[in-house]
Amino acid sequence: MRIAISAQTSNGLDSTIAQHFGRCPYFAIVDVQDREIQTVELIENPFFAGHQVGQVPGFINEQKADVMLSGGMGGRAIQFFQQFGIETATGASGTVRSTLENYFGGGLTEAAPCAESIEHGHGGNHNH
């Protein structure tokens, strides 16, 4: 299983989770087999400075991710991930390591859009 996780820093399993997946500077790409971490790679988000609708989910799909974990995620992104067959979960916080532990322990929730996401566009600041 390949899991993508939004990251604010690039420090392997100790990377800090980013709360807004589309504007995170990095993604941790973690290959897991039988809940054991096999590899961890931090890649830059090529759309960190700005993106069009669907570009970031498309990029994650190109990485062959099965799952996308983040602090928060907008409704349009969730729809794109559903179309790609990628599972999404939100509520992540802390580090990549703790997020994986929470995910496998059932501590993250299936992604639901934040209240502002469907109408906010990408112009304003908002909290998740």
Image (tube, helix red, strand yellow):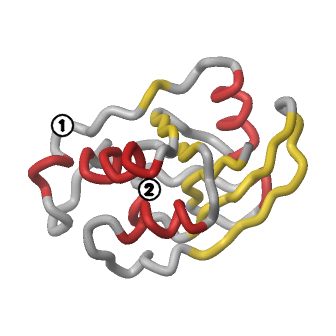
- How far is the residue under mark 2 from the one under mark 1? 15 Å
Residue 96 x %, y %: 69, 46
Q: Residues within 10 Å of mark 2 (few under 14, many from 20)?
A: many
Q: Residue at x 62, y 41 (%)?
A: 94
Q: Residue at x 33, y 79 (%)?
A: 50
Q: Secondary structure at mark 2?
A: helix
Tell me which label, 2 or 1, sits earlier in the chain. Answer: 2
Type of amino acid under label 1: Ala
Q: Quadrant of residue 99?
A: top right
Q: Quadrant of residue 122?
A: bottom left
**Would you say 119 lies left or right of 15 here?**
left
Query: Up-down: is 109 above or below 63?
Result: above
Residues marked 2 and 1 touching at CB (< 8 Å): no
**Would you say 13 lies left or right of 90 here?**
right
Residue 1 x %, y %: 74, 43
Q: Which residue is mark 2?
A: 21
Q: Which residue is mark 1?
A: 115
Q: Residue at x 40, y 62 (%)?
A: 22
User: What mark, if any, has residue 86 been given in the picture?
Assistant: none
Q: Residues within 10 Å of mark 1 (few under 14, many from 20)?
A: few
Quadrant location of the C terminus? top left
**Would you say 27 lies left or right of 110 here?**
right
Q: Secondary structure at mark 1?
A: loop
